[in-house]
Image: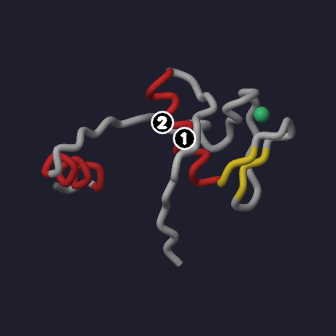
């Protein structure tokens, strides 16, 4: 394995996890409620129309919703965990 994605695919296959590559374009900039784009400042993504989410989970949720539903749409937050490395 010479690439990071190749190594990740290998490690997932060992655990029986499928890997799908997704295009992440605009996932951190697009509001899943109003579909408008802006670049977030700081750790929180805030839309002028009220949507607020942690910046890291915001992008991840948009990528997941696009894979599941074909669009960036609001998804229910359920116990999102992330590791913060200093
Ligand atoms: Zn919005």
Mark 1 lies on a secondary structure that is helix
Check if mark 1's residue and mark 2's residue have beta carbons within 8 Å. Answer: yes
Find residue 35 and report its horizontal and vertical position in percent: 71, 27
Checking the image for residue 5, the label placed there is: none
Report which residue position mark 1 lands on: 61
Find residue 24 and report its horizontal and vertical position in percent: 51, 39
Q: Residue furthest right?
A: 48
Is 18 on the left or on the right of 79, as rendered? left
Classed neighbour count for the residue bearing mark 1: other residues with Cα under 10 Å, few (<14), some (14–19), many (≥20): many
Up the image or down, 73 lies above or below 45; here it is above
Ligand 1, by image quadrant, is: top right
Checking the image for residue 64, the label placed there is: 2
Mark 2 lies on a secondary structure that is helix
Classed neighbour count for the residue bearing mark 2: other residues with Cα under 10 Å, few (<14), some (14–19), many (≥20): some
Find residue 58 and report its horizontal and vertical position in percent: 61, 46
Is 53 on the left or on the right of 27, as rendered? right
Q: CA distance from mark 1 to mark 2?
A: 5 Å
Q: In the rendered image, which quarter is residue 62 located in?
A: top right
- The quadrant of the image that shows the N terminus is bottom left
Up the image or down, 8 lies above or below 32; here it is below
């Amino acid at each position: 394995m010479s690439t990071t994605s190749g190594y990740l695919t290998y490690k997932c296959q060992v655990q029986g996890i499928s890997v799908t590559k997704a295009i992440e374009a605009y996932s951190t900039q697009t509001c899943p409620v109003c579909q408008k784009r802006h670049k977030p400042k700081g750790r929180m993504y805030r839309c002028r129309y009220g949507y607020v989410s942690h910046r890291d989970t915001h992008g991840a949720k948009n990528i997941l919703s696009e894979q599941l539903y074909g669009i960036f749409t609001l998804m229910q937050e359920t116990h999102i965990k992330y590791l913060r490395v200093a």
